[in-house]
Amino acid sequence: MGLSDRQHRIYEFITKFMRDKGRPPTIREIGSHVGISSTSVVNYNLNILAREGLIQREKEVSRGLRVVGHQAKSLAESVGLVQIPLLGKIAAGTPIPLPTFDGLTKHDGEMLALTRELVTDPEGLFALEVRGDSMIDALINHGDVVVMKRAQSAQNGEMCAVWLRDKNETTLKRVYREKGNRIRLQPMNPTMKPFYADARNIEIQGKVILVVRQLQKLPA
Amino acid sequence: MGLSDRQHRIYEFITKFMRDKGRPPTIREIGSHVGISSTSVVNYNLNILAREGLIQREKEVSRGLRVVGHQAKSLAESVGLVQIPLLGKIAAGTPIPLPTFDGLTKHDGEMLALTRELVTDPEGLFALEVRGDSMIDALINHGDVVVMKRAQSAQNGEMCAVWLRDKNETTLKRVYREKGNRIRLQPMNPTMKPFYADARNIEIQGKVILVVRQLQKLPA
DNA sequence: TTATACCACGAACACCTGTTCGGTGTCAAG
DNA sequence: CTTGACACCGAACAGGTGTTCGTGGTATAA
């Protein structure tokens, strides 16, 4: 069920108040800022927000409110950091280094920390730094960092790192299954033409989850 | 001056309570958990904590407490989190929305949390979501989020958002000063040719610090 | 000893705060 | 029309909450 305009304003006010003051507002503070004269109406709408799962309420406790939306979590739940191992470099002419798969051995090299806001499911993620211009058709430049998830297969349209057996080359493309064993590899740049290959000649090495490009300094 | 054992316990309780419940404790809640029967004693010690700069108090407000010490920052900030306001969208045909500059008004929209690892200096940063394909020559796609820093000028080679007065258009390019008033705008994609303009016809709106692209779902 | 901070206690006060209840108006289904 | 669900209002109540005041103990310096 959708929220009324009032409920929306109440929710926004709570999050803003929480961020500014560091504590939840009282019922009357909400009412006066949202334009509700009666505390019972605020209470009424708060119960609806609670029923919809947007906030949690604690009974008979002053300021017993709590925003449970994902936006609030990124602030409060500062534990919401995800550590991703930076496994190495990726270039067109080499297969990508894959993570060791026992899941226990800790990666002792560099780690990349990202918030859960950006990577929803941190399972099986690893990061690679791109060398060279070969993936420029995927809008990925030298120096970019790609965060990938281990995968052997892909849904239609997912951006994947694909090893081309016949060319001995890694490429980043969107993968679509066509009729038979034909696979269409679609560059991310919409001005470029797709590329077709036989399913037996390609090997999906992982899905691309995130691309991060830092521009403080020029790529070498 | 050092803190007494009681003050130390009070401070620890406040931070723990705040973390667990998402709101500051009342004076009586502090008293009962720290073992102080009188509210005035708690009040007395809270004033000392405030004088020492460890907390902030708001007068005559229930739960008017706020942990402010560097230890509180360690929750969000020493982990290296930086909050960046997501100001809106950027498209080729519109000037970018710039941050209000009074430094006091808080942004009440969405925030983007990043680690300091990625953005070294969080001063004056803001984020925009790119609409449309017009910046594909800068290797930036529809849906990408660019993190920018407010700036009127740029060093040679820095990636900037440039407003082209004669074309009424925003573009992202590397900026180089040439002889006279000539400015060279170099697309990021090395296969593309640079573009020249008169310095009086362009306006630098900010430097691009970071580009983030999420690929979980297809860009619309 | 006296004086002076410092720290603590309990009680009382005035206001704040969540809750509840009776009542009003609107709108769609019966 | 009647009914019921929904959204809202104002008022009142009981308990929560910050503040203040008078009091007393303990240590250190005069």
Image (tube, coloured by chain):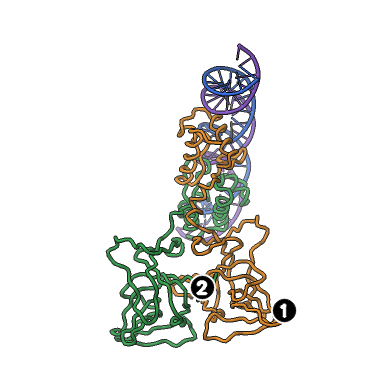
Chain colours: A green, B orange, C purple, D blue
Q: Residues within 10 Å of mark 2 (few under 14, many from 20)?
A: many
Type of the residue with mark 1: Arg
Residue beneath label 1, please?
A: B200
Three-letter amino acid code at disc 2?
A: Gly
Q: Position of residue B192 (x, y in %)?
A: 54, 86
Q: Chain of mark 2?
A: B
Q: Mark 2 sits on what residue?
A: B143
Q: Label 2: state its secondary structure.
A: loop
Residue B66, can we see it?
yes
**Which sits in the foreground, B127 or A104?**
A104
Q: CA distance from mark 2 to mark 1?
A: 31 Å
Task: Residue A17: give x, y in percent of width and height.
Answer: 58, 51
Q: In this rendered view, identify the residue nearer to me: B121 or A122.
A: B121
Identify which residue, A41 or A135, lies in the foreground.
A135
Is residue A120 visible to us here? no
Q: Residue at x 37, y 66 (%)?
A: A125
